[in-house]
Image: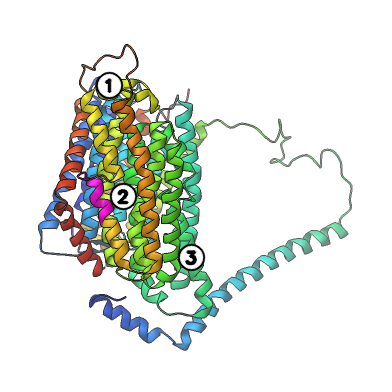
Amino acid sequence: MVEDGELGALGADSYTRRGHPDAQVRMSAYFQDYVTVGVFIALGAVLVAVMLGIAAVLRPNNPTRTKQLTYECGVDPVGAGWSQTYVRYYVFGLLFVVFDVEAVFVFPWAVAAERLGLFGVVAITIFMLTLIEGLAYAIKKGVLRWE
Amino acid sequence: MQIDWLAIAPEIVVAVTILGVLAADLVLPRPLKYWTATLAVVGLTLAVVPLILMAASSVETRSLFEGSYVVDDFALVLKGLFLIAGYLVVLMSVSYIESDRYYQGEYYLLLLSSVLGSLVIASARDLIVLFIGVELTTGPLFMLAGWRKGDIRSNEASLKFFILGVLSTAILLWGMAMLYGVSGEVRFDQIRSALADPSPAAQPLVGLAILFVLVGFAFKVSAVPFHFWAPDTYEGAPTPVTAYLSVSSKAAGFVALFVTVYVALRDRVDIWGPGLWALAALSMTIGNLAALRQSNIVRLLAYSSIAQAGFMLVPFAAASVAGEQLAEGLAATVVYLVIYALMNLGAFAVVIQGARRTGTGDIDGWAGLGRIDPRLGVLAAVFFFSLAGIPPLAGWFAKFVMFRAAIAAGSAAATSLAVIAAINAVIALYYYARVAKVVWFDEAPAGAEPATEPPAASLALTLGIAAVATVVVGVFPAVFAVFGEATRVLLASG
């Protein structure tokens, strides 16, 4: 099914790989990675069970009403567990994430700024301006006003 | 860093237009908001210029970013299709959106973002780039489908589309992750060479990865049995958005599917070939049978577009089950895709104007529309007969190319798919012709007067472009054969 010359190079490459004993090894190594994951999950479960189990055996068991309250930074909890949150927090959260992610891109650029030169400056400027336009949009639409 | 700026010029132009539309929407006062639409139209027109320059240049394949982004003739033809379809949908939207009381700037912003995503898909030769393209195409559409915030059907459309869209994305991503897992590569050509090495331990994983990728894309193109979101979403969404969904977004999903299976997974055609065969056969048959019973024109077009997706898949699916002439099959599918886009956009423009004239989306409510508004009646007949594949309209050439490719593939499975397609083409004629019959032969309701006011200029332009294209391609199919040839030649070297 190879119809052209350009693919010849790739074809040759795959041909040398085909039947190579490495192929088997690579694949079983791939599945072994998942065995590692499985072992870690099992270890985690065992660890929790052991710690809680030992604690249950050793500690005195003396529940009071105060002790069984939901722990909320030491303050007595108010209201039920299911409470509604202002939807506005969501918009703020969204904007926060946008600029948080911006930082993820800007810091690596700043580290490599000298090496990237003018191209990097232009690219990051375009990137920032795009986000700033988004911020301007949010402000204009009154998203950041709290009344 | 060396970048071929001309190759990514269309994307850059559209991206700048998006920012421009957003800025214009912020600064313009309410009465001048229509400038956002004008900007969108200008931007889409300008984006075609670099495409033409590239088509005229002697450089055949431009490969960027270490081969992750490739602009060849296949990409050029499809980018042209996406830009023209976006252009027609913007034109269609102008009068439709203005009649609403909602702000419009975001509408064009979201629409253009989706167009940008489909431009990226056409060039993506890398799992990550492809995924970004797919998400950029569908993400804005979730919001556009729910554009009429006060309309509960629109909300329903958006929600259904969103939930199933996210589900399909998860499945697709899972498949892609497994592909990466077995090959250790994200670039398509490297995935291909990595998968060419048949290690027995990897076989089940490869099969599963291909299955998941196939299912993920099948959701995007609403192929049966992954089509359940489509009719409700199409009916509830604003009609121009529905037109976009059924043309551009579907075409983008197809292109993403073809590029993945053709470039990255070509050697595993034994796995995905039968899958495509089943998708094609089921989509045609079930789409058509369901369309027979629809009384709402938009739902009819929704099921019709599911069935047409099946027809589109026929040449490529036939070639892939036969394991031969894959490039020819793909070329035929692309030709079908382009023609379908033009005539289906026309059909939706007719639906918008027809619903405005008659005040209803029920097919029976359109009785006598041909008397009330003869020009619209003629256009309705043109587009619906073209969808049915009656010569001398463009649809016949699409069907002709489809059957020729399916029969040329030659194996028993390919021929049986052609037979299923033939039966379905006859079934489809019934419901397409029924629309023309209601419009021309049923009595108009008493008191209906001939329409005097002309349609909005932008909508008239959409209808005009689509009608001219449909008739010209039907009479001189050689226009498209050239495109098809270009696609074939270049895909062979893909």
Q: Which residue is mark 1?
A: B30
The amino acid sitting under disc 1 is Arg
* Dominant SS type (magenta): helix
Q: Quadrant of the C terminus of chain B?
A: bottom left
Q: Is residue B23 among the parts visible in the rendering?
A: no
Asked which secondary structure carries label 2, the reply is helix
Is mark 2 in CB contact (under 8 Å) with mark 3?
Answer: no
Image spot of residue A123 (x, y percent): 26, 53
Q: Which residue is mark 2?
A: B118
Q: Which residue is mark 3?
A: B209
Residue plotted at (41% across, 41% down): B303
Residue that extends furthest to the top in the rendered view of this protein: B447
Residue plotted at (50% across, 36% down): A90
Residue stretch in magenta: B391-400
Asked which secondary structure carries label 3, the reply is helix
Q: Quadrant of the N terminus of chain B?
A: bottom left
CA separation, marks 1 and 2?
A: 31 Å
